[in-house]
Image: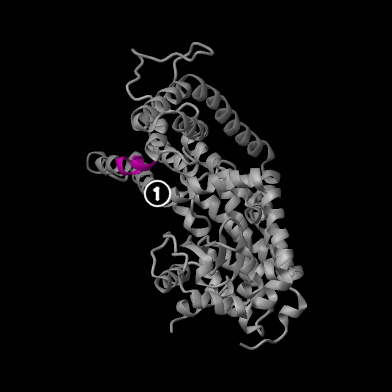
C-alpha cells in the first residue's frame, strides 16, 4: 500500500471509522472531515499518526499533513469511501470498519467521553457568534484565492511591461497591446469581484447564489453616467460605482438572504418562484443603492484610511506588532477578519500594505527551523520534519513548520514569532510596501509586490529569517530536542 493510503486508513480508524465521516475535503495543507459524532474521535491518536503534523478542531476536523501530500491523502480516502471530494458519505458506509475502530478505541472513549463532550460544547458556546462570523468570512473568500493569485501574477507581468515601456526599453506600439490584453484577463477577476463575493456570500448564508451575485453587480451601477447620475440621499452628491466596496456587498447580500427566507415562508408555493426573487432583488437592490452603498462607503474609506495612518505613523512599531502577533491570530482563527480588509485596500488603492508585514511571520518560522536544524542534528525525526517543511515554508506555506516543529517544541514558536516581528518592523520602516493580490506569502509573494518595492520586501524577508534564526539559536531550542533520537 502507498503512504497516502496507509495514512488515510489510519485517519479513518482514529476518527471512529468511515461511518463516522460525513464529508471529505481538503485545502492546501489540511484534510478536512465532517464528523458525525465527535465523541468517537481519538484526537491524541490522530496527532501521533505518522505523517500527521497537527490537528485542528473546528466545525470540521482538520488534519494537517502538508502541501502536495494532502491531495493524495484526501484522494485516497475518497477512493476508499467510493465518493468524490465534498460529497456526502452514505450513512451505512463500511459499518465493519466503524465497529472495529470503535471497539479499538472504546476504553479511551469511555474514559474521556464526558470531558470531550463538555469541551466541545464549551468551544461552541464560547465561540458561537464571533467565531461563526469569522468562519463564514473564510468560506466566502478562501475559494477566491486561486483567482486572486492567478490574476495578481498576470497584473504583475503587465506592470513590469508597462514600466519598461515608460522607461523606453520597449516599443509602445508593439508591447502596449500585450499590456492591454493582460489587464483584460486580470480584470475578469478584480473588476467583477463584487459579483463573485455576492455569489459566495449568498451560498454561505443560505440564499440563492445568483441573486447574491446580482446584488454584488448592482454596486457597479452599470448604466449610470455623469449625464444620468444617481444622487446620494444623504448629501446630494453623485453616487460612484463600487462605493461601499466589498464590505457593502457582504452586508447587502446577508440582508438579501434574511429577506429571501422571510418571503419564502409567506409567499404561496405556486407564486414563490416568480415573486420571491423579484421582490428580494428589488427591495435589497434599492436598499443597497440608497442606504448600504453610502453607509458602507464611509466605513470602508475610514477603515482603509485609518490603517494607512496607523502604519504610516507607527512605522517600525506597527510592523513589529503585526509581524509578531499574526501567527497567534491564525491559530485562534482571528486572521479571517483581515481578508475583506485586504480586498478593500486593493480595490481602493491597488494594493494592501498589511500583507507584506503579516507575511514576515512565516519567515520568522523559517529562520527558527534552520536554527533548530543546526542545534538538533542528532534528532533524526525532527530533522526529517524540518527537511520536509522548510522548502514549502520558504515559499510561504508555514503550517508544516508551525505544527510539526515550532509549536510542539514550545519556545521556538515564541522566538520565531518575534523574528517575524523584526521582519515586520523592517517593512514598516520602509513604508508603502504593498501586495496587489492576497494568497501567497514568503518568496512566492515577491511577484505580487506593488510599486517596484520587491527589493524592500526581500530585505524584510532576510531580516525575519535572521531574526528568527538568532533568537531561536541562542534561546529557543529545548535541551531535550538536542538529544540523539533515531528513526
Question: Is residue 189 in the magenta section?
Answer: yes
Give SS at disc 1. Answer: helix
In the image, residue 146 above or below residue 204: below
Q: Nearer the viewer, residue 344 or 25?
A: 25
Please report the bounds of the magenta region as a residue range.
184-190
The answer to whether residue 374 is above or below residue 352 is: below
Residue 309 in the magenta stretch? The answer is: no
Image x and y of residue 409, in percent: 71, 71
Can the viewer see residue 30 in this picture?
Answer: no
Residue 361, image quadrant = bottom right
Q: Is residue 56 above or below residue 281?
A: below
Q: Is residue 128 above or below residue 215?
A: below
- Percent from the top left, x then y, of residue 161? 34, 45
Residue 414, image x and y in percent? 72, 61
Residue 61 drawn at (x, y percent): 57, 62
Question: Mark 1 highlights which residue?
Answer: 147
Rendered image quadrant of residue 117? bottom right
**Residue 300 vs residue 54, the one in the foreground:** 54
Dominant SS in magenta: helix
- From the viewer's perspective, tell me whether residue 32 is left or right of residue 317: left
For the C terminus, which image quadrant? bottom right
Whether residue 407 is visible here, answered yes or no, is yes
Tell me which corner region of the image, top left, top right, bottom left or bottom right, holds residue 475: bottom right
Q: Is residue 220 left or right of residue 440?
A: left
Q: Residues within 10 Å of mark 1 (few under 14, many from 20)?
A: some
Quadrant of the image containing the N terminus = bottom left
Q: How many marks?
A: 1
- The residue at the far bottom in this view is 486
Q: Residue at x 41, y 47 (%)?
A: 152
In the figure, is residue 92 to the left or right of 58? left
- Residues 6 and 260: in front is 260
Amino acid at each position: 500500500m502507498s503512504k497516502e493510503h496507509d495514512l488515510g486508513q489510519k485517519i479513518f480508524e482514529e476518527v471512529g471509522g468511515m461511518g463516522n465521516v460525513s464529508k471529505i475535503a481538503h485545502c492546501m495543507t489540511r484534510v478536512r472531515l465532517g464528523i458525525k459524532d465527535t465523541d468517537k474521535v481519538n484526537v491524541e491518536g490522530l496527532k501521533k499518526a505518522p505523517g500527521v503534523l497537527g490537528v485542528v478542531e473546528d466545525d470540521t476536523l482538520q488534519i494537517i499533513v502538508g502541501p502536495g501530500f494532502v491531495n493524495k491523502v484526501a484522494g485516497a480516502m475518497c477512493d476508499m469511501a467510493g465518493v468524490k471530494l465534498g460529497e456526502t458519505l452514505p450513512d451505512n458506509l463500511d459499518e465493519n470498519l466503524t465497529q472495529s475502530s470503535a471497539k479499538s478505541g472504546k476504553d479511551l472513549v469511555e474514559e474521556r467521553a464526558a470531558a470531550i463532550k463538555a469541551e466541545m460544547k464549551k468551544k461552541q458556546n464560547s465561540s458561537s457568534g464571533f467565531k461563526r462570523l469569522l468562519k463564514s468570512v473564510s468560506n466566502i473568500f478562501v475559494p477566491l484565492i486561486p483567482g486572486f493569485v492567478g490574476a495578481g501574477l498576470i497584473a504583475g507581468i503587465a506592470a513590469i511591461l508597462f514600466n519598461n515601456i515608460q522607461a523606453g526599453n520597449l516599443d509602445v506600439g508593439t508591447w502596449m497591446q500585450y499590456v492591454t490584453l493582460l489587464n483584460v484577463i486580470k480584470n475578469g477577476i478584480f473588476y467583477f469581484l463584487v459579483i463573485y463575493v455576492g455569489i459566495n456570500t449568498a451560498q454561505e448564508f443560505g440564499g440563492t447564489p445568483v441573486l447574491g451575485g446580482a446584488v454584488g453587480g448592482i454596486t457597479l451601477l452599470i448604466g449610470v453616467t455623469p449625464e444620468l447620475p444617481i444622487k446620494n440621499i444623504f448629501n446630494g452628491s453623485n453616487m460612484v460605482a463600487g462605493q461601499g466596496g466589498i464590505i457593502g456587498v457582504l452586508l447587502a447580500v446577508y440582508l438579501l438572504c434574511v429577506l429571501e427566507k422571510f418571503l419564502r415562508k409567506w409567499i404561496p408555493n405556486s407564486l414563490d418562484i416568480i415573486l420571491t426573487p423579484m421582490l428580494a432583488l428589488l427591495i435589497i437592490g434599492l436598499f443597497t443603492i440608497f442606504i448600504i452603498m453610502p453607509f458602507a462607503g464611509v466605513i470602508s474609506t475610514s477603515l482603509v484610511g485609518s490603517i494607512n495612518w496607523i502604519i504610516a505613523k507607527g512605522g517600525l512599531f506597527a510592523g513589529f506588532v503585526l509581524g509578531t502577533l499574526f501567527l497567534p491570530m491564525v491559530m485562534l482563527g482571528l486572521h479571517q477578519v483581515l481578508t475583506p480588509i485586504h480586498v478593500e485596500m486593493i480595490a481602493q488603492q491597488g494594493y494592501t500594505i498589511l500583507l507584506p508585514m503579516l507575511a514576515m511571520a512565516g519567515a520568522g518560522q523559517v529562520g527558527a527551523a534552520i536554527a533548530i536544524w543546526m542545534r538538533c542534528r542528532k534528532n533524526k525525526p525532527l530533522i526529517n520534519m524540518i527537511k520536509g517543511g522548510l522548502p514549502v515554508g520558504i515559499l510561504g506555506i508555514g503550517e508544516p513548520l508551525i505544527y510539526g516543529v515550532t509549536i510542539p517544541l514550545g519556545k521556538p514558536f515564541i522566538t520565531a514569532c518575534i523574528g517575524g516581528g523584526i521582519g515586520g518592523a523592517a517593512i514598516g520602516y520602509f513604508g508603502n510596501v504593498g501586495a496587489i493580490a492576497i494568497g501567497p506569502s514568503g518568496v512566492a509573494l515577491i511577484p505580487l509586490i506593488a510599486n517596484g518595492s520587491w527589493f524592500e520586501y526581500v530585505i524584510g524577508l532576510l531580516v525575519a529569517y535572521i531574526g528568527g534564526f538568532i533568537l531561536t539559536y541562542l534561546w529557543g531550542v529545548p535541551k531535550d530536542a538536542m538529544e540523539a533520537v533515531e528513526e
